[in-house]
Image (tube, rainbow, N blue to C red):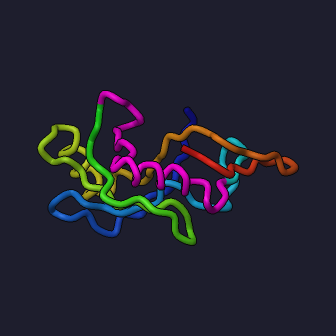
Amino acid sequence: MKTKDFALHVKDVSEEGTFTGYGSIFGNVDSYGEIVEPGAFLKSLSRHEKEKSKPLMLWQHNIDEPIGVWDDLAEDGKGLKGTGRLVLETTRGREVYALLKAGAIRGLSIGYREIKAEPDGDVRRLKELD
């Protein structure tokens, strides 16, 4: 599994631990030399909707440290936008909440599996991701 990191500009974290940010921005060349194309997440999001499931929200991609849930994930004109809610009844959820409120967390990262990609000169265009 690869990861992608993006700046997270937190405007507000609600008292319930809800926040919104982008997990992927379309059209940017990342550190892997890859560009995520619009539509890359649509099949995965559709599958989750059909199965009534959501991708996991993990601390530092650690499967042993879930910190919250995604209430909404969707593609828009900019990228993969998510609204999530930290589970404040967990120790790590409370820690992350405090760090977000203090401005100490400045990024959001997704883990993904590449399904379809195409080379395009010096970059790879990611067409479908899970």
Judged left or right of residue 122, residue 84 is left
Place residue 95 in its image quadrant: top left
Q: Position of residue 109 (x, y in %)?
A: 47, 46
Place residue 4 in its image quadrant: top right
Query: Does residue 57 show up magenta in the picture?
Result: yes
Residue, x 59% and y 46% (percent of image)? 129
Q: Which residues are magenta?
A: 36-64
Front in this rendered view, residue 119 or 62? 119
Can you say which quadrant of the picture contains the C terminus?
top right
Residue at the far right in the pictured view: 121
**10 versus 41 height, above or below:** below
Residue at the far front in the pictured view: 50
Front in this rendered view, residue 101 or 22? 22
Query: Does residue 69 show up magenta in the picture?
Result: no
Q: Position of residue 9 (x, y in %)?
A: 42, 63
Residue, x 69% and y 53% (percent of image)? 35
Judged left or right of residue 63, residue 31 is right
Q: How many marks?
A: 0
Q: Position of residue 52 (x, y in %)?
A: 33, 50
Can you say which quadrant of the picture contains the N terminus?
top right
Residue, x 42% and y 49% (percent of image)? 48
Residue at the far bottom in the pictured view: 77
Judged left or right of residue 119, residue 99 is left
